[in-house]
Image (cartoon, grey):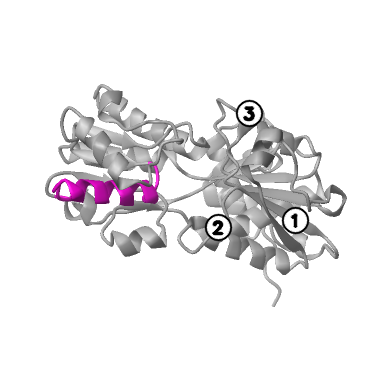
Amino acid sequence: MQNKKITAQDIADKLNISRNTVSKALNNTGNISEDTKMKVIQTAFEMGYKNFSQENKNITFKNKEIALFTTNMPNSSHFGSKFLSGFEKKISSFGIKLSIYIIREDDLLSRKLPSNFQTELIDAIICIEMFDANYSNFICKLGIPTLFIDCPTTKECPNLKSDILLMENYNSVYTVTKNLINNGCKNISFVGDPNHCQSFYERWQGYCSALLDYNIQLDKSTCILDNDSNPYSDSSWLRDNIKKLDKLPDAFICANDFIAVSLVNALKSINISIPEDTLVCGFDGSLEAKIIVSQLTTITIPSYDMGNLAAELIISRIKDNSTPFKTVHVKTSIDYRESTGFNIINTL
């Protein structure tokens, strides 16, 4: 029996919104909120709406090739590994090839393409960990369909002419911060450079908004916000910065799991216990963090599914590069563990 064809009305019924709103979101037209647009696109993808699934299956992509640009090759401890697995599986089902290019420091500075990159042979570009604003704009000017997985901050790159796929950052960090406050934490520190990339900035904004909504004055002197030229992965550097704080924060919200792991090691080196003396939360749900700090509270990214969605978005862009650019957020989940006193927080 043939599966029922999913329509815009089905999506509208699922979300309890009008069919017209669904149409505007899918076509990126009209005046609707980014949150509504994100929900519609994600629901359409999950339900198998034709623009994201069946329609693509009827297209031949023989000899198509997508180039992956990255400054850091994804590995087993990075969300990029699972992301790449989901992405490759999806595009290979259409017969699309993937080539990987590492963008070196001198490429960034001189704004040049890798020596073995041939523009005329590439049908689309996907960028992972490409946070240099000038180079990102340079890529967009090539005229090749492009998708950024995270990107430079919108302050640095306000008009990036590309589709952008992000994990949901703001609401999840807001919720964790709110729950920490409700459990008695008043002095909460943020650790990480908010301007490192758009996702870090959105996490910082979620943290700041929670403090504001609970009438807690933002005090940057309790945070570690140095620019990312500093060695956040070096626990001794973090230890020295913790010692400079006027007092030990009740909790630390870290911009990602790798910073959280370094922070935990730094705290342990000066005999500060978690969760007895302070609390720690990361972001990513990375395998390495889980191995090193098994009880780290974190915000988990559905990396594999995100890779799958990235493939759908970039295939759609290859089909038609004239449609308005999209920014899509993929929902994350909070995993409360012992590093934030999870037994208390989970009772909320």
Residues at marks 1 and 2, CA–CA distance in whole angstroms: 17 Å
Residue range of the region highlighted in magenta in the rendering: 255-275
Q: Secondary structure at mark 1?
A: strand
Instruction: Determine whether 133 is above or below 345 in the image.
Output: above
Residue annotated with mark 2: 74
Q: Is residue 152 visible?
A: yes
Q: Position of residue 57 (x, y in %)?
A: 76, 65
Q: Position of residue 108 (x, y in %)?
A: 65, 38
Q: Which tag, 1 or 2, sits closer to the chain's start?
A: 1
Instruction: Determine whether 197 is above or below 261 in the image.
Output: above
Is residue 271 part of the magenta span, yes or no?
yes
Specify the amino acid type for callout 2.
Answer: Pro
Q: Which tag, 3 or 1, sits closer to the chain's start?
A: 3
Q: Which sits in the foreground, 152 or 309?
A: 152
Q: Is residue 237 left or right of residue 93?
A: left
Number of other residues with Cα within 10 Å of mark 1, as a class: few under 14, some 14 to 19, many 20 or more: many
Residue annotated with mark 3: 31
